[in-house]
Image (tube, grey):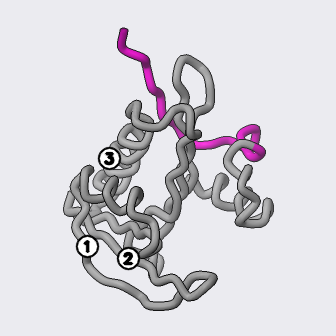
Amino acid sequence: MIEEISVRFATPADLAFVQQDRYIPADVVKRKIERQEVIVAQRDGEMVGYAWFEYLWSLVPYIALIHVLPEHRRRGAGKAMLRFIEEYVRERGSATLYSSSQVNEPEPQAWHRHVGFEECGIIAGINPGGAGEVFFRKRL
């Protein structure tokens, strides 16, 4: 049985779901929702994941976060959100999409490579505890 995954821009009604980690203050997330920089994935009407993207230097599309609920991982939601973002930024003239992962997170790094990203740099010591950040690029 194929499960249907739908992806759409988040609305203010989705705030609690897309802010569940409380990493970013609610007022910032609200502004990102208003600017259509947050998307949500649903499977059979149930919220299963969200992603935030933004623009480095106001020009370069960058995925800031992709989160899929643990019980829904490895079932296509992350890829569906990535395709949505790729299509959205490509339609607006972008030929490249960037993302990143902490250097001590092998699973997210493997996912990036699996979906076509290539490593393009590291910033050392940028995260709490001194962990670096690996940056990835995907040509669209």
Horizontally, residue 67 falls left or right of residue 109, namely: right
**Residue for badge 2:** 134
Label 3 element class:
helix
Residues marked 1 and 2 touching at CB (< 8 Å): yes
Residue 6 is inside the magenta segment? yes
Mark 3 crowdedness (10 Å alpha carbons): few <14, some 14-19, many ≥20: few
Q: Residue at x 52, y 59 (%)?
A: 65
Mark 1 crowdedness (10 Å alpha carbons): few <14, some 14-19, many ≥20: some
Q: Residue at x 71, y 65 (%)?
A: 23
Q: CA distance from mark 1 to mark 2?
A: 7 Å
Label whose residue precedes the other's in the sequence (1 or 2):
1
State which quarter of the image contains the N terminus: top left
Q: Nearer the viewer, mark 3 or mark 2?
A: 2
Q: Which mark is residue 119?
A: 1
Q: Nearer the viewer, mark 1 or mark 3?
A: 1
Q: Is residue 4 above or below residue 67?
A: above
Label whose residue precedes the other's in the sequence (1 or 3):
3
**Residue for badge 3:** 87
Label whose residue precedes the other's in the sequence (3 or 2):
3
Q: Is residue 110 above or below residue 104?
A: above
Tell me which segment is drawn in magenta.
1-16
